[in-house]
Amino acid sequence: MTVNQLADQKPFTTADGSTIRSILDATNAPVEKQSLAEASLPAGGETQRHYHKLSEEIYFMLEGEATMEIDGELQHVGPNDAILIPPNAWHQITAITNIRFLCCCAPVYSHEDTYFE
């Protein structure tokens, strides 16, 4: 059985500029097909617009307000919103207030699967 505590995970900056803590992924568990991380951005912060060729992502907003852009479509998002980001979809999240959200990727997130303009 694998049980990881969020508080035990060290934060790092992803290729898109967000700060994440991997909760369960190939670096800290015998995960093969998905990953789960907590991501955060300060008010006014944003990820660099990007896409993933392989990974389908789901963001689940825990705290704060943001603008989510997927393939040119903008939507205001906040706590308890779940956002589907299909593979090959350009996307960017911009924090209006400090935000914290869960990010699930399948297959497992990798920097090598992150592409920029």
Image: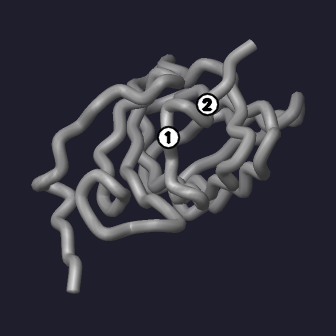
**Residue in view at x 50 percent, y 32 percent:** 111
> Left or right: where does residue 96 sit relative to residue 55?
left
> Left or right: where does residue 74 sit relative to residue 85?
right
Residue 101 vertical position relative to residue 76 in the rendered view, above or below:
below
Question: Mark 1 = which residue?
Answer: 110
- Find the residue positioned furthest to the right: 72
Quadrant of the snapshot with the N terminus: bottom left
**Residue in view at x 67 percent, y 29 percent:** 92
> Left or right: where does residue 89 sit relative to residue 45?
right
Q: Are marks 1 and 2 in contact (CB under 8 Å)?
A: yes
- What is the quadrant of residue 8 in the picture? bottom left
Give the x, y percent position of residue 100: 41, 45
For marks 1 and 2, give the CA distance. Answer: 7 Å
How many numbered marks have been drawn onto this rendered protein structure? 2
- The label on residue 37 is none
Give the x, y percent position of residue 6: 21, 58
Residue 117 vertical position relative to residue 23 in the rendered view, above or below:
above
Between residues 7 and 2, which one lies in front from this camera angle? 2
Give the x, y percent position of residue 35: 45, 59
> Left or right: where does residue 88 sit relative to residue 13?
right
- What is the quadrant of residue 66 in the picture? top right
Indicate the amino acid at tag 2.
Thr
- Mark 1 surroundings: few (<14), some (14-19) or many (≥20) residues within 10 A: some
Q: Say what secondary structure mark 2 lies in.
A: loop
- The colour scheme is one colour
**Residue in view at x 69 percent, y 38 percent:** 52
Quadrant of the snapshot with the C terminus: top right
- Find the residue positioned furthest to the top: 117
- The label on residue 114 is 2
**Residue in view at x 41 percent, y 42 percent:** 39
Indicate the amino acid at tag 1.
Ser
